[in-house]
Amino acid sequence: MPPSGNLTCIEICSGAGGQALGLEAAGFEGLAHVEYDPHACATLRLNRPGWHVVEGDVRNFSAKEFAGIDLLAGGVPCPPFSKAGKQLGADDERDLFPEALRLVQECQPKAVMLENVRGFLDAVFTDYRMGLKKQLKELGYEASWHLLNASDFGVPQLRPRVVIVAVRDDLAANFYAPMPLTDGAIPKTVGQTLVDLMAQNGWEGALEWAAKANEIAPTLVGGSKKHGGADLGPTRARKAWASLGVNGKSLAESAPFPGFTGMPRLTLRMAARIQGFPDHWDFAGGKTASYRQVGNAFPPPVAKAVALRIREAITGMEHVRKRA
């Protein structure tokens, strides 16, 4: 159950709703979810008909009507900071950090939460990071960035991601980065996570397969409109999946049937579970469009962990280092 007493937020670059689900679970009510991709917008509307989904380029979105909200959140595009995207940073037309700063200035939230890839922390972007921190400071926020592994929060894949958190100066001392799960709550292996889905059509080999798929998953790779499709990534990623007994060359339409031999492929639902989505969350669009939504998502449990810490900072709750 989410904490009582919802706080308010707007979200940019919402994608398929991974971050939004985490925010919701942490007690944030989304007043607007801005997303460019029509398939992702359809996914949000399909699962949450009551959400205010704004379909279009965030460059055309104004946050002025949301002045005074609690949180501005977003998963700004990763390619400007990823090796696959050539790490062009500010020179990449997909860099939306300037738009995020504009929106911060317009709505003056109590806190900001922006997710990106590990490459954001590379040395080549030191000046970019310092410039971002300076601009946020000029707007009245203390910014910090945190490298989090999804596996530390119960998600069955490593998935390192950077979360940039900026908290208003008068509240900044209350913010603490989320701590990994404790009490031995290690993530499940791929086999433990997916055995029931692999067996749902009666495949006799599901239990044997699950026993051998005894590690957490490699990071799911969603690709972009220019690169990548309904597969589990480039050659190196596919080899990692093969070591777990998974054929990563494409996605399957369904789980294996009785008599199946060889390495099974993941279905879209299996990939979504690996990403931390609940099984009831459906995806709109064809296989490739749906898988890109899954592969590019911010795992909901990680988003929840960060959002709970932000909630504590905003509300002045006593910081408790426990399972958040």
Image (cartoon, rainbow, N blue to C red):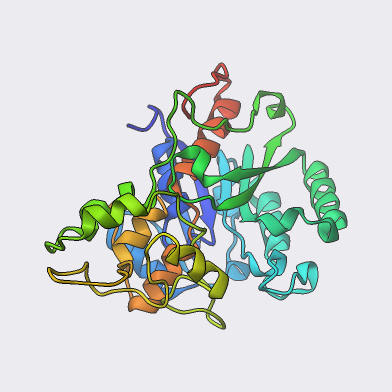
Residue that appears at 70% across and 69% down: 83
**Side (left or right) of 316 relative to 100:** left
| Pick the front one: 270 or 71 | 270
Q: Position of residue 24 (x, y in %)?
A: 40, 42
Q: Residue 76 location, x and y as percent?
A: 61, 60
Compared with residue 323, is residue 125 higher up or lower down, i.e. above or below? below
Can the viewer see residue 22 in this picture? yes
Residue 135 left/right relative to 268: right
What's the residue at 23%, 60% (across, down)?
198
Residue 49 visible in this rendered orientation of the protein: no
Placement of 160 over or under 283, stated as above or below? above
Task: Give how far across and how far down residue 140 sits, in percent.
Answer: 77, 39
Q: Nearer the viewer, residue 142 or 8?
A: 142
Relative vertical location of residue 43 with respect to residue 85 in this rendering, above or below: above
Q: Position of residue 203 (x, y in %)?
A: 16, 63
On screen, residue 27 versus residue 228, left or right, reads left
